[in-house]
Amino acid sequence: MTELKYLSGFGNEFSSEDPRCPGSLPEGQNNPQLCPYGLYAEQLSGSAFTCPRPANKRSWLYRILPSVKHKPFAAVPRGNLTEDWNEVEPDPNQLRWLPFIIPKSAEKKVDFVAGLQTVCGAGDAKSRNGIGIHVYTCNTSMVNRCFNNSDGDLMIVPQQGEILITTEFGKIMVEPNEIVVIQQGMRFSVDVFGETRGYILEVYGAHFELPDLGPIGANGLANPRDFLCPVAWYEDRKVAAGYSVINKYQGKLFACQQDFSPFNVVAWHGNYTPYKYNLKNFMVINSVAFDHADPSIFTVLTAKSTRPGVAIADFVIFPPRWGVADHTFRPPYYHRNCMSEFMGLIEGHYEAKAEGFQPGGASLHSMMTPHGPDTECFEKNSSAELKPERVAEGTMAFMFESSFSMAVTKWGLQTCQRIDKSYHHCWESLRSHFDPNWKPSKQQ
């Protein structure tokens, strides 16, 4: 496959046209009486018309046929994709999942949509406030069908296997250690190249933004220039047997049929696009004197709530970096949090739990549930020589942190059969080091 091209920047005003049709973008206006090449003009709005200009999101698509040309939608089975947060009783325990199983292609062909399973979430798509956390496990490409999410934005985090995503805006290749965001309403199809697995953060009612940098200054963390969106690409393809458009709407799946490919956009312009980001480009900021900084310094993207400083969801990573803090227990501290913390591991070994937490697995530490380093990590790092060292080399862990108190689905707790019931044992051997006769040493 020819190497794909991209446009660089976060939230920019972009424009792109397929080089096979030069001049396909109208000049000086959005919807002329007759578009070049006999195309249809269609606007895709990602915000209310009257949003303040910095938050106003929309793109104009110039397509061979408009997306309105389709048969009526009808409900289709949604499998383990759900928004029912009351299927099972709440569970405040620390939860850890072994790697989620990828179906073998020799046994059953499963594409991206069929392989979606909801692990946990909270809130409500109808009221446009909440999140869902899913995994995808699949082994075959989507053929003559695409997906769009009317409920919110999807952040896809591949863990095993690269995925080629065809969107109305063009094609995006995404590999492990990259993420891709498909914003609300955008149609896409996923090609895979073997057994494939990853994580998805779905956000209702808000779009992802770069976090404010405050005293950090103008540069740092995820820099805008490192975000990439696709260039225009189209196919003028008839599908006599029918092309399925699958729509996630109010937590359920619906499908309609049409006789042409939806990826027929010859040109487009706007600031509402899909985009990807390579996590290796993250500019890490860390403590260079003492103490373990809060993990918010590793925030890549945030979906803000209406409360200042409180996120519907943050996407946080724990990338390779230097650890140099003096007089400090360097791994993550013991913690009880007013936020919910869902963690996944793309590759390597997470620093606070070198054993048990595996790539392709996950953990959930719910609101105010205690968590922190296991016994081995605590004992080792309480007496380690504090010299400069590389931390998390060859590792990429991440966290979806949310202000919502998330419920785990029946699939997540029972059906998937991947709950690690021994998880709590990693803290059972923690012992008291309390010494009532302790005196400060001369070195302190």
Image (cartoon, rainbow, N blue to C red):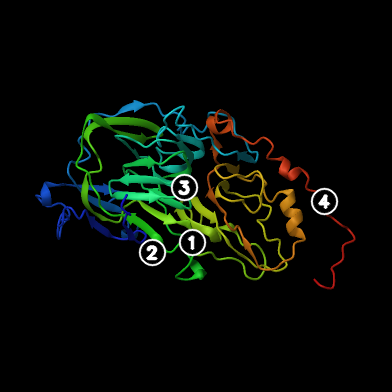
Label 4 amino acid?
Ser
Please rate how many residues cluster around mark 2, counting C-alpha atoms within 10 Å: few if below 14, some from 14 to 19, many from 20.
few
Q: Residue furthest left?
A: 34
The circle drawn on residue 157 is 3
Q: Earlier in the sequence, mark 1 or mark 3?
A: 3
Q: Depth check: give the residue in front, 15 or 311.
A: 15
Q: Is residue 288 above or below residue 263?
A: below
Residue picked out by circle 1: 282
Q: Is residue 104 above or below residue 369?
A: above
Residue picked out by circle 4: 432
Residue 246 at least partly seen: yes
Label 1 amino acid?
Phe
Q: Position of residue 416 (x, y in %)?
A: 55, 31
Circles 4, 2 touching at the beta carbon (< 8 Å): no
Report helix, strand or loop for mark 1.
loop
Circles 3, 4 touching at the beta carbon (< 8 Å): no
Left or right, 125 with respect to 315, comes to left
Give the distance between the C-alpha atoms of the residues marked 3 and 2, in whole angstroms: 20 Å
Q: Earlier in the sequence, mark 3 or mark 2?
A: 3
Residue 312 at least partly seen: no
Please rate how many residues cluster around mark 4, counting C-alpha atoms within 10 Å: few if below 14, some from 14 to 19, many from 20.
few
In the figure, residue 151 lies in which quadrant?
Answer: top left
Q: Earlier in the sequence, mark 1 or mark 2?
A: 2
Give the distance between the C-alpha atoms of the residues marked 4 and 1, in whole angstroms: 39 Å
Image quadrant where one finds the C terminus: bottom right
Residue picked out by circle 2: 225
Q: Position of residue 116 (x, y in %)?
A: 45, 35
Label 2 amino acid?
Arg
Left or right, 99 with respect to 312, comes to right
Q: Position of residue 120 (x, y in %)?
A: 52, 38
